[in-house]
Image (cartoon, rainbow, N blue to C red):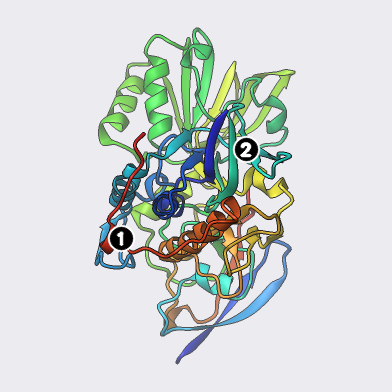
Amino acid sequence: MIETDIVIIGAGPTGLFTVFEAGLLKLRCHLIDSLPQPGGQCSEIYPKKPIYDIPAYPEILAGDLTDRLMEQIAPFKPGFTLGETAETIEKTEDEKFIVTTNKGTKHLAHCVAIAGGLGVFEPRKPPVENLSSFEDKGVEYIIKDPELYRDKKVVISGGGDSALDWTIYLADGVASEVSLVHRRTSFRGHLDSVQKVMDLADQGKINLITNAEVTSVNGNGVLNQVNISHKTEGNIAKEVDHWIPLFGLSPKLGPIADWGLTIEKNSILVDTFDYSTNIPGIYAIGDVNTYPGKLKLILCGFHEATLMVQSAFARIYPDKKNVLKYTTVNGVQGFEA
Amino acid sequence: MDTINITVIDRDGVEHQLEAPTDMNLNMMEVCKMSELPVEGTCGGMAMCASCHMYVESDHDLPEKSEDEEDMLDEAFFVDDDKSRLGCQIKITEELNGLKVKLAPVG
């Protein structure tokens, strides 16, 4: 069991900065994020986009902002559980919380700060009837283990880098047959990947089916056929072992929606005094919360994190008085390990 | 003209008559959100999420789609090549007076 003072759910800019403000109060933090890297939307959706409303940065790339925050919080030695989704929460007898991820990692903390932004990034699922009944029975939205596809017939859908990269990978002696289905004739993604896929198609090593979409799936318990509807050639029925639709990720509030928190318009309602939720000890900061006048801005998330850790300190040390100390006077005293 | 009239058909088929100012640098995603229509606008308007996918039903001449918009529509569902646009990429200008759009289903 991982033990800390504050477990932070979401390692986006707000979650990361919380580590700094908590560290100034000598509180330790551990971050959980469903993505494999810190930065949240900034690193997942728009790392190369400039942000212009971070004070004192006339312009900073979202990816660089993440890097700077990581540098800023490094003295406070935060822990990370990445690539795992916070799934359940339970209260212990001594008023602490245990947050468990989908992979079973447990985190014990005095306080929980939900900095979950837009939620958990989940694969976009195409609107195909009965699709959910074939999930993990031939339909996979993420490739976890390429060996699953050895000597199998595979159809991949999508036009981006992951669709191109996996087509190239699986066509190289892994799957027995690879078909790439894409709605347009042009592909986005790296030019050399596009070229490689075109070459593989020319050499007859893959079936490239453009101007087409998979519109239905069939099988008896496990997937054995997809129907591809082509713009001009009509329906193509294809015998397959696997269909891998790769249409990117989109955020969903996810499991925290079931934690008994007051939710308003898909966001967690908080008290602006300390960004506490209706459950004492659980806070919500950044884009995931709502209150009268809420603005979903990174800089507002920083402010919310700063006020929130004051309240967390009072909860963890009810008998201690806390005096605001300026970093210009005291510097930053990190943790030893 | 300071405002234009826009019709938005929601996912239940209900028509909403909206007025949108032309001098606030707005786009259709923002206009829908301001009117509390169910458009998420997850990425904030960067053509990076397709949550503001809509069909243009009137015959207005809209500016061509950017590469970013085309790419994002690739990842969207229920795409109609002739009508599909991302609302965040439709800038509100005088020329769009009388625009009629329909919100695309959410996947």
B87 up-or-down from A225: above or below? below
* Quarter the C terminus of chain A occupies: top left
Camera-side residue: A250 or B11?
A250
| Chain where mark 2 sits | A
> Can residue B21 be spotted in the picture?
yes
Q: Which residue is mark 2?
A: A99
**What residue does disc 1 label?**
A327
| Front residue of A219 and A101 | A101
Give the number of marks. Answer: 2
Cα distance between the residues tagged 2 and 1: 32 Å
Residue B56, horizontal then vertical, whole percent = 54, 65
Describe residue A162's horizontal placement relative to residue A110 as left or right: left
- Give the image location of residue A11, x and y in percent: 45, 45
Question: Share a chain, discs 2 and 1?
Answer: yes
Query: Label 1 is found on which chain of the structure?
Result: A
Q: Could you tell which of marks 2 and 1 lies nearer the N-terminus?
A: 2
Q: Residue at x 56, y 75 (%)?
A: A293
Question: Tag 1: Cα neighbours inside 10 Å, few (<14), some, or many (≥20)?
Answer: few
Mark 2: secondary structure:
strand
Q: Are marks 2 and 1 in contact (CB under 8 Å)?
A: no
Amino acid type for the residue under numbered disc 2: Val
- Secondary structure beneath dot 1 equals helix
